[in-house]
Every structure is written in C-alpha cells, then in structure tokens.
Amino acid sequence: MKTIYFECNMGAAGDMLMAALLELHDNPEDFVERLNHIGIPGAAVSAGPSVKCGITGTHVSVTVHGAEEGAEAHHEHHEHRHNGYHDIEHLIGHLDIPDTVKKNALAVYKLIAGAESHAHGVPVNQIHFHEVGEMDAVADIIGVCMLIEELAPERILASPVNTGSGHVRCAHGILPVPAPATAFILQNIPIYNDDTKGELCTPTGAALLKYFVSEFCKMPVITVNKLGYGMGKKDFEKANCVRAYIGDTEKIGGEILELVCNLDDMTPEAVAFAQQLLFDEGALDVYTAPIGMKKCRSGLSLTCMCRTADKDKMLALIFKHTTTLGIREYISRRYTLQKKQSEVKTEYGTVSVKTSCGFGVLKSKPEYEDVARIAREKGISIQEILKKL
C-alpha cells in the first residue's frame, strides 16, 4: 500500500508540509510553476534549499505583491488585512485547480473556521482569519492539497505532534502555545511538548494533519522509496523540519481499541440510536451480542471498535447515550485488505464497486445502496442488476 508518513518531531506548519511533500514529487520545479499560475491573487511561490543542523532540505516561501506576508507558516505572527470565511470560499472556488483539490482545501479551512469560531465565541460567518486567511496561507493549503492529489497515497500516517511551548504573540495579544485555535484542532490527536520554546504547530499545519492523516502512530514497517525534508524559517537546537516518507507498506494493520459494556435496561430503539451516533463520530464498527447477566436477566454486550486517537470521544459518547456505568477496554491488532472503489456503468445506471486485495486475495462487491436505488427506480430485482456487473 502506497503510504506517506509525516514525522512531526518539530511540529508542523503549512509551508513545512508543502516543502516536505515537494521533495517527494518527481518534478518539483514544474509543480511550483503550475502552482504560481492557478490564480491566487498576487501570490508568488518559490522553493529553495535550506540547511538546519547540517541537514539539507527545502524551504518554501510565498510573496504577495513582492512582499513576504502572513508569518503563519514561519512560526511568527503579525497583523495584516483580514479575510472572512466566505471570501476564502469564493477565492478557492474560482482557482484553476481540480474539484477534488477545491473540496479538500475548503474542508481544511472549515476545520480552521470551526476552531476560530470556538476560540473567539463568534459564528463561523463572522470569523476573520488574520494570518491564516492571508494569500500565503492559501498558497500553502492549496499546495499541500495539490501535492497529495498528485502523489496519490493510499493512506497518510503521522507521528504524535510536538506543539512547542511558551507563548506566542498574535493579533489578539499574547497567547499560550499551542494557541487556542490550534489546541482545538488538535483534539483527539496525540500531542506533546519537549520544552522547545516557540510555536511549532500552527493552525494551518494542525488542520492539514487532522484532515489528511488517518492515524497518528509510530512509523510502520515501510519500504521507503523517497523522503523529503520541509524546513521552517526559525532555527532551534533541533533541526526545524517536517520529514516525510513515501513508500510501500505490505501488511495493512495497526492497533485498534475495543470498548465493551453490558446493557440490560435499554430499549432496542435507544441502543440503535447510540450505535448510529458512534458510527457517525468515526467508530470503525459497532455491534451487539445477546448475553445473560446477573439476576438471570437477558441483556446485550455492546462493542465499539475505534482508532486509539478516538478513545476519549467514544468513551464519552457511550457513557452519555447508554445506561452503562463501566466500560472495558481491549487493545487489538487489526489486519485489513487494501480497498479501492470504482464505478461500473450498466444499462440501468452507474454502480459503485468496492474492490479489496492483499494477502493473495481479491474480492469485489457492488455498493448495496446503488443497487437498491436502481432496483427501486427501475422496478426490477437486485439479482437482475447484479447480472449486469
């Protein structure tokens, strides 16, 4: 499985992630040239070599109308003109980039907008992005989204994130590190600080990681094809960089949690409601099994399978939406097949087909909802549609 792994021992910022991914690209010069012609107003992106603690990597910088703006990507903060959330939506919607890149970039900004809204106590449509909304940050986010689109990894993993420590000056005053918006985005992500003074993880970096990374974990067994170093602007005792690996992971596995509780005083409707909420919030699987409980009562064992990063969220949901007073935790090793989805055109309509492979096995299965929808619309049986696939 084609995998990208980000090593975030010195945090993450938008420019550092873009620079690290740029070193993984087969033609970085051509990519920068194309990025400069997608229509970001006044922005000019450049990439050049940078040395930190004897390691040579790439530093990306953005000038707007000839001047370096928005220090979001450089771990500094200055006050500039502000852009609202709808301004950013309008801008990204009119850039000359693929629709998937637009979708991903807007989703990243939605994470930032939600965090700023929570931090400042105002609705999202009243948020002004300060440094994050400047054209250099737009370039960083679009650049990362474009690079991930073109590198086309099947999954993206990352290490726990070093946030830095101390305080940072921004448009609202002097704030603790991580800044409130960054801290909000980093919820359910493993973070730490090693007493390095300064803001190592920025809101942009945090949002990009949260959106694209499927699991924060130790580096898996990976056959590395290429690695990249994305350098920050500041110098520290440790090399200020994000290191990115791209390569192949053969066996698809990882640790997952099984959170289990016993229930004997809930209606079937209430149990179903709790199960659906857990699925909606990212549970990998939720299921029940009949059990016999104390006092000879019939009951249910509810199991929620989730990623380790989602543990606290799932625990809170189970306690809130079920009657249990205690939950058991089991750590499991999971192996999965590599999954792909394609579309098959039939005389009745288009059907999504899921294909899974690995461990010498190949399986295909049509998407039930597509087949059922066509069966209802055409007044035919499911079996008739399956014969056409």
Image (spheres, rainbow, N blue to C red):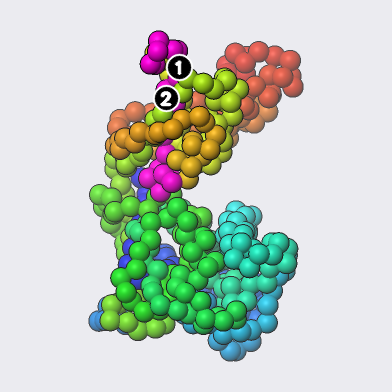
At a point 38% along the width and 56% down the height, the residue shown is: 190
Q: Nearer the viewer, residue 236 or 50?
A: 236
- Residue denoted by label 1: 299
- Residue denoted by label 2: 262
- Residue 134 location, x and y as percent? 62, 76
Residue 212 in view here? yes
The part of the chain drawn in magenta is 293-312
Q: CA distance from mark 2 to mark 1?
A: 7 Å
At a point 38% along the width and 72% down the height, the residue shown is: 164
Figure quadrant of residue 66:
bottom right
Q: Nearer the viewer, residue 178 or 35?
A: 178
Q: Are marks 2 and 1 in contact (CB under 8 Å)?
A: yes
- Residue 118 location, x and y as percent? 61, 62
Label 2: how many residues lie within 10 Å, few (<14), some (14-19) or many (20+)? Answer: many
Residue type indicated by callout 1: Gly
Label 1: how many residues lie within 10 Å, few (<14), some (14-19) or many (20+)? Answer: some
Q: Quadrant of the C terminus?
A: top right
- Residue 12 location, x and y as percent? 42, 68
Q: Is residue 245 magenta?
A: no
At a point 71% along the width and 61% down the height, the residue shown is: 123
Q: Is residue 205 left or right of residue 100?
A: left
Residue 288 in view here? no
Q: First in sequence, mark 2 or 1: give its number.
A: 2
* Residue 170 - label: none
Q: Quadrant of the N terminus?
A: top left
- Residue 163 location, x and y as percent? 40, 68
Question: What secondary structure is found at the residue carrying circle 1?
Answer: strand
Residue type indicated by callout 2: Asn
Q: List the single residue furthest toward the top.
A: 296
